[in-house]
Image (cartoon, rainbow, N blue to C red):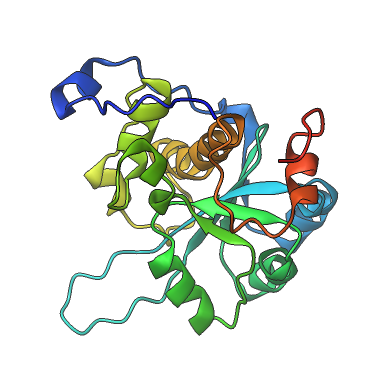
Amino acid sequence: MHTPETILPSKEQIALLPRFQNLKSEQILVINTLEQCHAIADELTTAALLGFDSESKPTFTKGEISTGPHLIQLATFEKAYLFQVNSEILEFLKPIFANHDQIKVGFGLKNDAHLFRKKGIELNSIIELSKCFSSFGFTNPMGLKNVMALLFRVNFPKSKTISTSNWSRKILSPQQVDYAAADAYAPVLVFEELLRLDLIPQTIPNTSLKLRIRPNKSAV
């Protein structure tokens, strides 16, 4: 067992760390048609590991019901796929989320799961990474920003302005695209690092999935 770094930098220290290097713009695909879905179907359905997040247009009025998710993000080590939600795209994504043999990892997925259930989407092999840090001495759920600082010593930017922006708009801003891609891509890196440290949760369905994610490593 590796001995993980357990000292979490302070908020002030995190601000001074090198900025997180997100995927390049050409590695981020914004998808809003079924034709685009079919074009990436093979690479998406064969991925053993997918980072996962979703964004919804914020609700500001008491009692207002969210109509989200309006954007669903999936990511591999090489690409991020930002799906602007419509009924056809949801149907395309359903088997991916239902697939027991594809691990979907992310942070703060409880609300995502609630919205997805309302849309009739079954979520299987989902791993909530915020609860995977008891080996580091953290018993409470960890946020993505703190995890990235802990594991990689980088400053992962989290803009409140962007997070509460209108995610249902037809054309997303470059800032929204970058933010949304990072929120799906970073969990892939976190999962891979936990796997490298032999600290991966025991809730992974089976060891063959570990072999598919890291084929040059023997299963634990």
The structure residue drawn at horizontal position 14% and vertical position 23%, both measured from the top left corner, is: 12
| Res. 104 image quadrant | bottom right
- Residue under the image location 32 percent in, 28 percent down: 6
Above or below, 58 against 119 in this view is above
Q: 175 or 217: which is nearer to us?
A: 217
Above or below: residue 198 compared with residue 112: above
Return the residue nearer the eye: 179 or 194.
Answer: 194
Q: Is residue 208 above or below residue 22?
A: below
User: Which residue does the image show at 38% across and 57% down from the upper left?
Assistant: 108
Q: Residue at x 41, y 41 (%)?
A: 135
Query: Is residue 184 positioned above or below 10 on the image?
Result: below
Residue extending furthest front? 1
Residue 134 coordinates in the image, percent (x, y): 37, 46
* Residue extending furthest toward the right: 42
Q: At which x and y percent is residue 121?
A: 61, 77
State which quarter of the image contains the N terminus. top right
Position of 64 with respect to 72 (left or right) is left
Q: Position of residue 90 (x, y in %)?
A: 64, 71
Q: Which quadrant is home to the C terminus?
A: top right
